[in-house]
Structures are given as C-alpha cells and as structure tokens.
Image: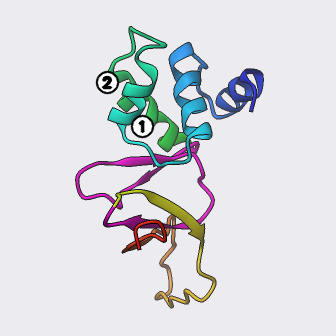
C-alpha cells in the first residue's frame, strides 16, 4: 500500500496521519510477524531517531481502538500487534516463538444464551511449527 492510500485509510478512521503513525502502520502492514512494541522500535528508531516507545504504544492503542490493528495476546510476556483485523487463528511455536496466521476454523460452533453478543473471537493455538519439528 502506498503512502497516499495509508494516509487516506488513517483519515477515514479519524486518525491524523503523522509521519510516525504512517511509518508504524506501514511496518505493521509489511511485517506480518505480529511484532511487539520493542520490535517496532528497533526497526524504526534509526529511520526516525525521535521516535519513542511511548509514541509506538499510543499509536498502536489508537489503531486498535479505531479498528486498524488488533492485539494478539498469545505471548505471555509481550503484547503483539496485527494489522489483519479479519477473523483468523494464531499459532505460536514454542521453539522459535514465531506467530503464524491460519484461517478461522469454520467448525467452531459455540451456542450462546440469548442476548449475548460476540464482539471479538480469539483462537490461539500453541505447538511446534513445521520448521522446528
């Protein structure tokens, strides 16, 4: 996605497209690795020396609030972030720590009592990936 498209997407969600916000959003879109704040900081700090972890936290919180990103809480130690907000499953490898995306299981049938409304569904799988196996 080019800078103009990213800028338009942010504006559509009511977010002012600053340089830092555009860089963070671009990083999320290009690196589907479910990065942590520390990983984003390490990747972007040399490009934007004034960038702080606080700015990254605040930006990601705003993206989550506006539906441009989601928090992936599959890692016990860190919050990870994902620019893909469509329903899907996450798998975390216990050996290498990588997090993979898989299609959301169609067979997940949960019957809820009346007046329960699902706002978000998270399916987390843990195991060993094919590279580590």
Residue beneath the point at 44% across and 58% down: 99
Q: Callout 1: few (<14), some (14-19), or many (20+) C-alpha neighbours within 10 Å? A: some
Magenta segment, which residues?
A: 67-95
Residue 91 lies within the magenta run: yes
Q: Residue furthest top?
A: 50
The foreground one among 127 and 82 is 127
Residue 49 lies in quadrant: top left
Residue 102 lies within the magenta run: no
Q: Is residue 68 above or below residue 76?
A: above
Q: What kind of element bears circle 2?
A: helix
Label 1 vs label 2, nearer the camera: 2
**Mark number for residue 61?**
1
Identify residue for label 2. 54
Residue 121: x and y in percent read 49, 69
Residue beneath the point at 72% across and 22% down: 3
Residue beneath the point at 56% across and 14% down: 19
Q: Is residue 66 above or below residue 23?
A: below
Q: In the visual, does 80 lie left or right of 3?
A: left
Q: Is residue 51 above or below residue 125?
A: above
Residue beneath the point at 48% across and 43% down: 64
């Amino acid at each position: 996605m080019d800078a103009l498209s990213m800028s338009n997407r942010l504006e559509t969600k009511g977010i002012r497209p600053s340089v830092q916000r555009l860089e963070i959003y671009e990083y999320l879109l290009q690196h589907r690795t479910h990065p942590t704040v520390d990983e984003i900081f390490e990747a972007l700090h040399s490009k934007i020396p004034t960038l702080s972890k606080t700015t990254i936290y605040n930006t990601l919180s705003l993206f989550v609030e506006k539906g441009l990103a989601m928090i992936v809480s599959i890692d016990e130690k860190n919050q990870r972030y994902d620019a893909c907000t469509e329903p899907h499953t996450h798998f975390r490898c216990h050996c290498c720590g990588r997090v993979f995306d898989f299609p959301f299981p169609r067979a997940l049938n949960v019957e809820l009592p009346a007046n329960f409304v699902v706002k978000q569904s998270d399916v987390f799988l843990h195991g060993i990936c094919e590279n580590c196996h």
